[in-house]
Image: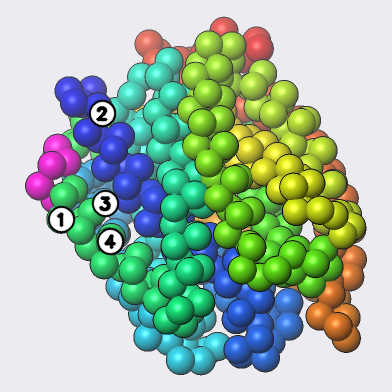
Amino acid sequence: MIKNQNILIFLLAAISFTHILDFVIMMPLGPQLMRIFDIGPSAFAWIVSSYTFSAGLFGVLGAYLLDRFDRKNALLVLYIGFLAGTIGCAFAESHLTLIVSRVVAGAFGGMLAALIFSVIGDAFPESQRGRATGIVMSSFSVASVVGIPIGLWAASHWGWHSPFLGIGVLGLIFAAVAWVAMPSMTGHFQHKPLVKLTPISLVVRTLRSPNELWAIALNFLLVFSGFSLIPYISTYLVSNVGMAEHNLSWVYLWGGALTFFSSPIIGRLSDRFGKRRLFTIVGLLAIIPILALPLMPRLPMGLMLIVTTLFFILVSGRFVPAMAMITSSVTADRRGSFMSIATAVQQLGSGIGASVAGVMIVRGAGGELHHYGWVGVMSALVTLLSILVAFRVKLVNPHDPQRPNETESAQ
């Protein structure tokens, strides 16, 4: 285990912050990008999905490579590649060039996300992974509270390119700090390396493991349910609910601020009472805002923020115990390759969810979105299915890599 775990958590959270902000800033920029490029929901969905599809496809390559290198070196290489794609967005001048830049960012960003969770799995025992996962995932909250409002403010003053340039510069600073302060991590080399396995054979090996398939299915269902709704929240609030475009930052400010506190709490509770149990509770509660948000009529600003804030807290809260379960469903020697495959499927789930919703949603003559409520019903049903799937995922016993954790399996 790493001696100074606090430094490691800070570095992972900082890198995750820029990685998440690069992705989530695209959602509130939706109304502006649709107007500037004169595109509809389906074309905007491709801007979002190009990142996730690229991340999913290159994630298979990550499954072949990630367990072969020092975690630190792999993290730095992937992070620099991701930042190159992000900075490319800052100089994109058309719908097509923006998609190309998102493909580059996704190619490295998907593997980067997998590696972050692999580092958590290597550095923390199973009994502490919920807490560590909750802290790192709270970077989403910081991105929402700090990053999105600042990004939207910059976009309104200097154009939509400016947030991506800012993320790129900040990321280069974090990369330099990680290069100096992050310890070398080669503990996974103690296990027999999978040097003879090809990318295809790694995927086949995962396909032959029922437990890993259930974990990957859980990952896919969660992101599909979330990203069928998330990319269109800003457009729906502006076009259907009547929120002023400059007030969108309040949605992410309040949602992110409270999620900053709720994610670590959910992580600690999942360590104490069982990850499956917490996932079930949070997942069932999440169905309420999942249905309420896409059916929301014109409301006072305060009521709008209550609905959107609950959505962020509960929908993102599902991922804390879920990701702790997923990282604990495989032994350390295969965690990097497995998490890369799992993250690849996760990214594909995000892209498929956004694309399916983009086909279902119709933009009216006045710019309003139709059939968004049906997307919410689909998301709620998929959430229920994910809860059933979670009961099939067994956690690896840290004292015996070949046996499931009987205590957690019984919860």
Q: Are marks 3 and 2 in contact (CB under 8 Å)?
A: no
Q: CA distance from mark 2 to mark 4?
A: 21 Å
Q: Earlier in the sequence, mark 2 or mark 4?
A: 2
Q: CA distance from mark 1 to mark 3?
A: 12 Å
Location of mark 4 (residue): 170
Residue situated in front as seen by the camera: 379 or 288: 288
Instruction: Identify the amino acid type marked 4.
Output: Leu
- Residue 191 image point, x, y percent: 26, 29
Q: Earlier in the sequence, mark 4 or mark 3?
A: 3
What residue is rendered at 89% in x and 66% in y?
A: 371
Instruction: Identify the amino acid type marked 3.
Output: Leu
Q: Are marks 1 and 3 in contact (CB under 8 Å)?
A: no
Residue situated in front as seen by the camera: 227 or 261: 261
Q: Is residue 177 visible?
A: yes
Q: CA distance from mark 4 to mark 1?
A: 10 Å
Location of mark 1 (residue): 176
Front: mark 3 or 2: 2
What secondary structure is marked by label 2? helix
Front: mark 4 or 3: 4
Location of mark 2 (residue): 6
- Residue 293 image point, x, y percent: 80, 51
Q: CA distance from mark 1 to mark 2?
A: 18 Å
Residue 75 circle label: 3
Magenta segment boundaries in residue numbering: 179-183
